[in-house]
Image (cartoon, rainbow, N blue to C red):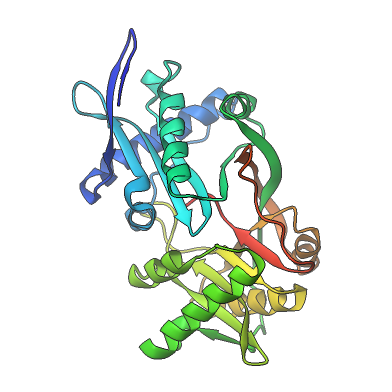
Amino acid sequence: MTLSSPASRAHGPFPVTAADIPALNRLFSDAFTDRYRRDGLTGVRVPPLNPDIWRYAVRGAGDGAMLWRDAADDIVAFNVAHRSGVEGWMGPLAVRPDQQGQGLGRLIVEQAITRLKDAAVGTLGLETMPRTVDNIGFYSRLGFVPGCLTVTLARDVPSGVTRGGTVRLGDCTPAERAALVAACRASVQQAAAGYDFTNEIELTAELELGDTAVCKRNGAVAGFALWHAAPLAEARRADELRVLKVYATERGVLLTLIRAVESTARRLRIGRVAVRCQSRFTDAYAALIERGYEVRWTDLRMTLAGYPEPTLPEGAVLFSNWEI
């Protein structure tokens, strides 16, 4: 598809390849730094991401990782549309600052919507900064409606924690690992039909970004937590273990998983754990606050009308980050 405007002519979408990552990283840093500047945060410079995190996002998204080029063949915009079974979401996405305000943002969002709808997702969402009212208005005009917050909660790793009651996939034999991944998929689908985080679990292990802790009760998987220890920003040391996906049948399982993750962080000599918690899970949120986690950041979660998040059984928890 080609977009014509008085100032630009963009061509795409083209698939994102590994060779595109350095240019994507520069556009990402420039666009988000510009976004903060327009929000009044003039001293903020968004660093480029760790290239391994880009590889995780691009490979995980497959043909949902899309970019557009200008007449000089430079990248002018990108959008990474992800699918975890029937859960679909997009991000990061950006338009080069000098080409904003000309309709390209609408084009790349609509293209991702089409890709995800064609993949038969049941949930279709994204996250944006709550303070950025023009972003919220932009997405609202495209049919998205605001929902809960994703609250990033963090705390320093406590002493004396253990990972009792859990197993780490990285400690398993290949056969044990395959069986546990399948059991994790079956367990989450009992609460959220069609949800499947197998791709993220396997890519995390393959790219050595982190691992998955699994909690079993009475011989069955009762929950799991997927985490990354690799630094998020380029050329930074690992100073935070980030919990990206959590499924737990109830509060006790959630806390068992959180203790296991904290124990792993201590073993890896990483001083802090961060959890991306959706605020609709009020009991889980309160449990984390009681455990000493503090609010560090918020993102507004928005879903396309008609493509909401699922309603879970009472007491169940499902944290699924919609950013990389």
In the image, is residue 129 above or below residue 135? Answer: below
Q: Is residue 159 above or below residue 153?
A: below
Q: Is residue 296 above or below residue 144?
A: below
Q: Position of 27 compared to 110: left or right?
A: left
Q: Quadrant of the N terminus?
A: top left
Q: Left or right: 149 with respect to 95?
A: right
On the question of residue 46 being in view, the answer is no
> Of 31 and 127, which appears nearest the observer?
127
Residue 219 appears in which quarter of the rendering?
bottom right
Percent position (x, y) of residue 14?
A: 26, 38
Q: Residue at x 78, y 62 (%)?
A: 289
Q: Quadrant of residue 139?
A: top right
Residue at 57% x, 80% y is: 214
Residue closer to the observer: 282 or 46: 282
Quick one: 32 or 3, which is closer to the camera?
Answer: 3
Question: How many dots with numbers?
Answer: 0
What residue is rendered at 59% in x and 69% in y?
Answer: 189
- Could you say which quadrant of the image residue 105 lies in? top left
Q: Is residue 135 left or right of residue 34?
A: right
Horizontal and vertical percent for residue 39? 59, 26
In depth, the one of 266 and 195 nearer the eye is: 195
134 left or right of 81 in image: right
**x, y percentage for residue 106?**
46, 25
Q: Is residue 244 above or below residue 301?
A: below
